[in-house]
Amino acid sequence: MSDVLVRWNRLSHQDAVNDILPCCGSRAWAESMAAKRPVSDETSLLVTSDESWRALSQSDWLEAFRSHPRIGESRAEPSATSKLCAWSAQEQQNVTAADVPVKVALASANREYEQRFGRIFLVCATGKSAQEILEILRGRLHNSDHAELQEAAEQQRQITQIRLKRWFGK
């Protein structure tokens, strides 16, 4: 068993919740993860995460979404931890380096998305260029409300998996 999991498994419930919360941003998800300890290895951690995520309510998903900054911005909601902010900046590094016209187009498309769906656009940005993200955003503007909520939830699940691997030390 990894040192990270040995330490996390030994924490009090509340400390375990707070420790893993930056990986997702949903308190209900973090509570579920802490309640399912002990976790023996990375594979079990990732499976447990997916199970916990899929069992959440829509309001819990929205809480996780709110923990992210907009694509192209570095600010998340005020309660975001420094770890979460650092991970978001790392995930969006290709957007930060984009040309000004792409950044302007992203900002405009973000506003359109927020007006249409009432929440920020969420995409697993790791490894994607700003232009790719812009194309994804524009395509998802055509989704129904239900389809888009499901897609955003899947993107959050992918982000959480990446962050858990970072948290785990990989």
Image (cartoon, rainbow, N blue to C red):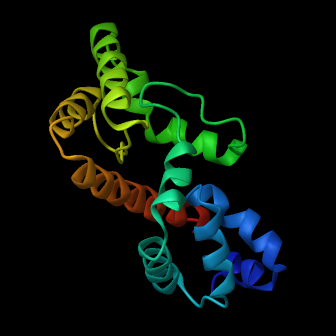
Quadrant in which the N terminus is drawn = bottom right
- Based on the displayed image, in which of its 4 quarters is residue 51 positioned? bottom left
Q: Residue at x 51, y 58 (%)?
A: 59
Q: Residue at x 49, y 48 (%)?
A: 65
Which residue is at the front of the view, 98 or 32? 32
- In the picture provided, is 16 more to the left or to the right than 59? right
- Based on the displayed image, in which of its 4 quarters is residue 111 positioned? top left
Expressed as whole percent of the image width and height from the top left, the position of residue 22 reads: 63, 55
Q: Residue at x 64, y 82 (%)?
A: 2
Which residue is at the front of the view, 39 or 29? 29
88 lies above or below 103: below
Expressed as whole percent of the image width and height from the top left, the position of residue 12 reads: 84, 79
Q: Residue furthest top?
A: 100
Expressed as whole percent of the image width and height from the top left, the position of residue 28 reads: 62, 68
- In the picture provided, is 19 more to the left or to the right than 103? right
160 lies above or below 1: above
Numbered-mark total:
0
Expressed as whole percent of the image width and height from the top left, the position of residue 162 reads: 45, 59
Q: Residue at x 49, y 86 (%)?
A: 44
- In the picture provided, is 165 more to the left or to the right than 28? left
- In the picture provided, is 107 more to the left or to the right than 24? left
- Based on the displayed image, in which of its 4 quarters is residue 161 positioned? bottom left
27 lies above or below 98: below
13 lies above or below 64: below
